[in-house]
Image: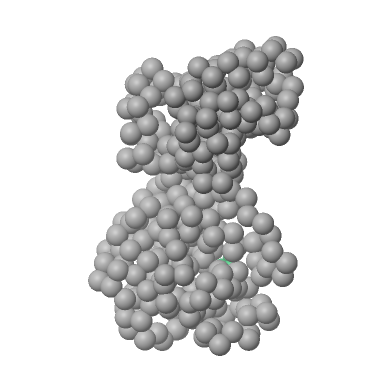
Amino acid sequence: MSRWIGTANRGFASYAMEELRRLLPGVRFTQLAAGEVFLMEVPGYQETVQETLLASEPIFLRHVQPVVRELPLSGNADDLQELSHVVRLAESQFEGKRTAVHVRRAVGTAFPYSAADTKALIDAVLLELDSEPSLQAPEMILSLYAAADSLLVGWGTPRELLSDWPGGAVRFQKEEGQVSRAKFKLLEAERAFGLTYANYRNAVDIGAAPGGWTSLLLERGLAVTAIDPAELHPSLHGYPRLTYLKKNASEAKLIPGSYDLLVCDMSWSPMQMCRLVLDLQAALAPGATAIITVKLMHRKPLQTIREVKERLQTAFHIRKAKQLFHNRDEITLYLEYKS
Ligand SMILES: C[S@@+](CC[C@H](N)C(=O)[O-])C[C@H]1O[C@@H](n2cnc3c(N)ncnc32)[C@H](O)[C@@H]1O
């Protein structure tokens, strides 16, 4: 038996649990934060469960941490003493590694310390253990969840926890003059799917307005064909590498085999999106990458995603489907064009 904390985007925990029930028979859930954070008890060793989660990563599970120890809270300095003791006992996990300390506090927890204070104290313990406290590119993450009356302690690599951000909540700095918040979705997709947009040359952006995604790809040095009947933000007009087709994507005429990246963020019915993307496939070079958001329009997201995958699989390999932190009522697909 092993215990875990799972985290999904707010309102989507029930779908993460549905996926986990299929993956881990006998799993039992208790809610920690409504619709978002839950505790799960799984009949199976931590290593086996971890392997299963990595082999078939659930779409709606944003973050997961094993619960290695549960410390009852006293609400005073004893809580930090106990935590330091647990970290010292686990020395071999952290020794010689860059370690990040992630602290999450549930509303109403009896844990009296802020994330910053806890981190400062544990960083000092890590230094004693020959570990390098670091938030950048950590090799190990000590993950703490302060629940109502206990502190849930676990650790793992960023890959094992499915993210190198506390609870998988990826934060990007908003830039001055940023065209749209949608830009964060494409930035997060780059990290989540291990891509480097600068390695691509020619992108087509379907449903591009106001232009957040297009602006990111232009900044990375790509030539971009942006298609949208709506207006692009005026700040984009000066780019020489931008071709703007102010029309419905179904009317766009594109040069066959010419794009190595397709991005599509149309906020439209998933089946109409599939039809449009499949109709434009001849414009893609063999092996081209596609990043596509899928709007979850009704109450059965898992079924919608299954249907969308079936349709797109006729032309694309499905590399990954994930609800990213910056996705609202949608998920993001990472695809590779077959031929
Ligand atoms: C959520 S916005 C895209 C935001 C964009 N990714 C950004 O970063 O600014 C969706 C856009 O899709 C466009 N759209 C919807 N259906 C379309 C279609 N059939 N062809 C082209 N664009 C379409 C809409 O006009 C709208 O501007």
- The residue closer to the viewer here, 98 or 187, is 98
Quadrant of the picture in which ligand 1 is shown: bottom right
Residue at x 63% of width, y 73% of height: 210
Q: Is residue 199 above or below residue 63?
A: below
Residue at x 28% of width, y 73% of height: 286
Residue at x 66% of width, y 31% of height: 119
The x and y percentages for residue 70 are 55, 16
Q: Quadrant of residue 52?
A: top left
The x and y percentages for residue 324 are 52, 50
Q: Can you see residue 53?
A: yes
- Quarter of the picture holding the N terminus: top left
Q: Is residue 90 above or below residue 274?
A: above
Give the left or right position of residue 22, taking residue 114 as reference. Answer: left
Residue at x 48% of width, y 55% of height: 191
- Quarter of the picture holding the C terminus: bottom left
Q: Residue furthest left?
A: 339
The x and y percentages for residue 246 are 55, 84
